[in-house]
Image (spheres, coloured by chain):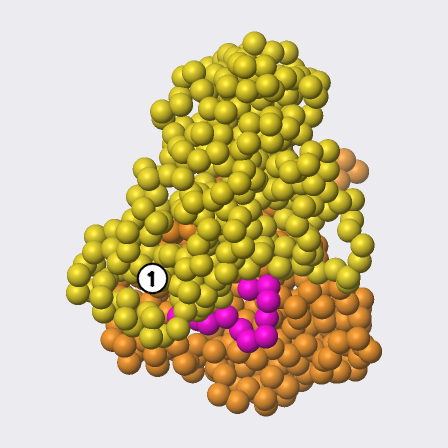
Chain colours: A orange, B yellow
Amino acid sequence: MMYEGSSFMKGMILGGIFCLVVSFFETFNSGTHSEGHEHLHHHLKPVSKDELEKLSESQMSDWTLQVRVYCLIMVTPKLLVHWATANDTWSKHCDKSVFYTSESSKVLEAVDLQEQDEWARLRKAIRHAYENAGDLRWFFVARPTTFAIIENLKYLVLDKDPSQPFYIGHTEKSGELDYVEYDSGIVLSYETMRRLIEIFKDVDRCPERGNALWKTPEETQLATCLKYSGVFAENGEDAQGKGLFNKKSVSSLISDSMGQNPADVVEACCSDMAITFGGMSQSQIQVLMYGVYRLRPYGHDFHDSLTFLPPKDSDND
Amino acid sequence: MSLSVSKLNSNILIAENRRAAPEFSQKVRVLCWVMTQPKHLKSRTQHIRATWGKRCNIVLYMSSEVSDFPTVGLNVSEGRSQLYWKTIRAFQHIHTHHLDDADWFLKADDDTFVVLENLRYGLSKHNAEEPLYFGRRFTPFIAQGYMSGGAGYVLSKEALRRFVKGFADGLCTHNTETEDVGLGKCMETMKVQMGDSRDVLGRQTFHPYPPDYYLPRQTPRPRPWYLIYEHYQPVEGPGCCSDLAISFHYIDAVQMHTLEYYTYHLRPYGYKYRFKLTTLLSKTLIALALETQWFTRKALVNPNLGCHSFKEERTSVCLIVMCLRIDGKSSFPNI
């Protein structure tokens, strides 16, 4: 009996080792496989200052006209306070901002998608935005709990051609799949939107109603559909490699930096050209709005190559 | 009380000036003293040293003990009851050792965040040889009112002389523990004039509480407790606070670096700020000034009247503005 037991054990061990070896090689293979498919600019940075200075006036004004943003803000009545705050603050800086809701609210205006499922809602919103884009070529999708500095978003995509597929934000990995984190905002070019509308028709690769057993978050569903369209996630960063899209609040990031870089808290923390922050309360957002668009030291002037004017009928920027 | 230069109907102000900041720091010298204590050096004061402290022409950290921080040791013990003694000793120390090192003398707490550039801009058109004192004006306890201690207040050189003389001559005494009220009383006794630190739109620059107390929109309501002492009619919501704010108080370590990030780092690329001087002026005035400036390459107006235009190329413009009515009180000139 011992003899039989030990060859069973040997068999088990051999089999186990074999499985480990095979899966080890597989990760290597799929690693190199995805390498080949990977976009050249997995880390996406803004155009350099030197390049900007070399541009002619007409090129600059072309780019300024091209870089106009349609904001899709995905709300629900539960998020009413943040919905109202987004409406009162950063969304005013989009060239067009549309609130898409799961159900209508008596208090605030929105496109009522009458849809409880988040992925289905996102799809409907994307379809609506694409159909109503007019001549806008960049799209920013966010929840109202995110705060965005649209001018810095424009700066990031300034020299990128929206008839190319772009899918930008803070990238994370889910297994093999690179996706853009929803909580820090998602940037899509017009071409990406067009491809999405196409792939939405593919019920197998990009189903509207997913598996009833487990729900995949919309951000990974989106990344999957985009992958099938040949569009890959890119991480938005500044010239120094600092991430521009954040799902944490400013104070949370500062607090982390105080622990990690006590000698150089602000320098090490966050980019001067940051685009998004998340997880902030209504009053923190009002302070951030003031901090971004108003509070400044007299005498520090910048000579930026672009000009963005304050929005009409607004008093907090 | 007669006023000299500060009572103007035409106000001479500066438009966009690239190089204002470094020039200003020599023209408008500010000595900052921070009221602190040994227990707070690590938890609070070091964050001031890491952020705005270095922007003062001179910064002194005043404590009960001398240390390598470095702190100045005042001959006073710690505790709320000693605050006015600390203030008196601090100003006496400064008067003895630093009177000629600065034009203006700012007191701040170790949880106050200060934007020095905006303070200098506000002070720039005033004469430090006049008895003036600026801050966030509170009404009660003293006839002319007093300036909130937490929000920070700033004394002109003459005001500092008078404060120290007041104690030397026995006209001012240690009659209270509340340092801001005590100092305010002495200022009144020594005929130091209270300035109006609000900007031209009536927005406050010194703040005794953090920004989240003032900025969020409110439905019209009776004054909340933290606005009860206000001398000027308080405004809640975005109109509370000047773009060129000077101070906020009750700022903890994280908030200190956060405000530093907001003020000096985070910005919207290419954004043209809504409240700029040039929006208040007529196009003809600007065109005229630019032409003259370009032609002469000199300041358009007498620098003594507060125009800080420097001999520079067309980046700096000095303009005459006839659009502001100054009501006879010393006021801040800015946007």
Q: Which residues are magenta?
A: A307-317
Q: Quadrant of the C terminus of chain A?
A: bottom right
In which image quadrant can residue A39 be found?
Answer: bottom left
Furthest residue toward top:
B75
Nearest the eye: B185 or B29: B185
Tell which subunit mark 1 falls on.
B
Image location of residue B164, percent across then percent down: 51, 20
Q: Amino acid at mark 1?
A: Leu
User: Is residue A220 within the magenta segment?
Assistant: no
Q: Is residue A170 at all visible to an observer of this figure?
A: no
Task: Return the residue at label 1.
Answer: B319
Q: Quadrant of the N terminus of chain A?
A: top right
Q: Is residue A2 left or right of residue A193?
A: right
Crowding at mark 1 (Cα within 10 Å: few <14, some 14-19, many 20+): many
Q: Is residue B295 left or right of residue A188?
A: left
Above or below, comparing residue A278 to residue A76 in the picture: above
Secondary structure of the residue carrying numbered label 1: strand
Image location of residue A20, percent across then percent down: 58, 49
User: Is residue A315 within the magenta segment?
Assistant: yes
Q: Is residue B167 at all visible to an observer of this figure?
A: yes
